[in-house]
Amino acid sequence: MTIAEQIRTIAADARQASHFIARLSSAAKNALLMDMATALVNNAPHLIEENAKDLDAAGQKGLSQAMLDRLMLDTERISVMAEGLREVAGLPDPVGEVTRMWKRPNGLMVGKMRIPLGVIGIIYEARPNVTADAAALCLKAGNAVILRGGSEAIHSNVAISRILRDAMLKAGVPPAALSVIPFTDREGVLEMLKQEDYIDLIIPRGGEGLIRFVVEHSKIPVLKHYKGVCHVFVDASADVDMAERIIVNAKTQRPGVCNALETLLLHKDVAERFIPRIYNTLTTMGVEIRGDETFRRFAPEAKQATEEDWYEEFLDLILAARVVDDMDEAIGHISKYGSLHTEAIITADYGNAQRFIREVNSGVVLVNASTRFSDGNQLGLGAEIGISTTKLHSFGPMGLEDLTTTKFIVYGDGQTRG
């Protein structure tokens, strides 16, 4: 078969299997996930052997040490992967939950019930643990899933999927409910994005280039976020000790992730007393600061910020910083340059906190807390399939509920419409 024919067959089989998965009880899904976790641990030597093929190929291609580390599997990481499946098994099952119920004047009882989306396609890069994590979340939410990982992890991803599919087969669950595209040709991605008859949603996970490619070519709805240009606004009433702690954490704890701080906004009333302090603290920690003219008046050693810096997701120890006259200017800056990902305000003024929450329309808005909390696990979702900066049908970190939709259910006792 051609690549197009293979992809269409995988998608059609997944659609058929999705009907079976949607009917599984919570107990059956949880038992399956526990069996999958055990299978991963039991097959760790085989996984490490297959992963070595990916590491060898990546080394020959000259991939960075950071990329090699993301790619590598060992016994400990496989155990963590298995524990992730067990954690998903322990999460509440959203399928079948009645989220609302109301009574109409004619006696009809109307409600909304959560149901699976159907078939979810996930396109991602590098880390092979995503294969197990994404499969577990999709299956727990009653969906079939088609996974297309990066070429650098093809042996690892195929091996993980075979282990998980074997566990499904032993449990009497159609293995077609979990498929990994077994080849690396870009044609495979393009064909996958054409399967609107079989795939209900595409979730790309990776860099901005990958996500834009998927959006450009997909005939299927895409949940995406291009980048995380996250802001912290230090209000005039802010506790500067708190502000320093939060800024340091948001920028330096893990600078290469999408919820790291990229632009710092400071109210003019705190500029003189806070800028020298935060500049010294951050530069001592290796952060390069690019400030506007007002910021550099109090920290002249800072580099001059450019217009492009306000749009930039640095993913590094680099921070853009600007002094604003008031909250209007801060919110205006976020509205113009932000990416709808995550924003925080540091303030002791309740009214300002509430206004910031109301008027800043990013996926996560925080008061007096680090942007690094913009994460499904940290927000209590248990696990995360990704982060959406689109507003249909999910916005912000996505957990199990976001892998479902709702349908109307209606109870009557003989009513007819006149």
Image (cartoon, rainbow, N blue to C red):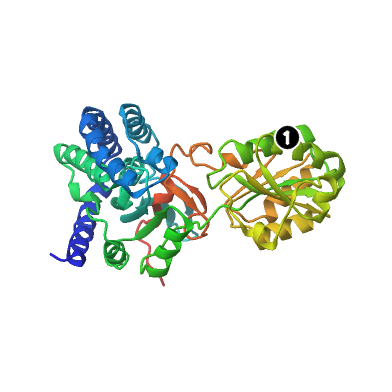
Q: Position of residue 224 (x, y in %)?
A: 46, 57
Residue in the picture at 84% in, 55% down: 325
Apparent side of residue 140 relative to residue 226 in the rendered image (left or right)? left
Q: Amino acid at mark 1?
A: Thr
For residue 110, which quarter of the picture?
A: bottom left
Apparent side of residue 4 relative to residue 324 in the rendered image (left or right)? left
Q: Residue furthest left?
A: 1
Q: Position of residue 278 (x, y in %)?
A: 76, 38
* Quadrant the C terminus occupies: bottom left
Residue 323, can we see it?
yes
Q: Residue furthest bottom?
A: 418
Residue in the picture at 45% in, 57% down: 107
| 1 vs 373: above or below | below
Relative to the observer, which residue lies in front, 176 or 307?
Answer: 307
Residue in the picture at 73% in, 60% down: 332
| 182 vs 2: above or below | above
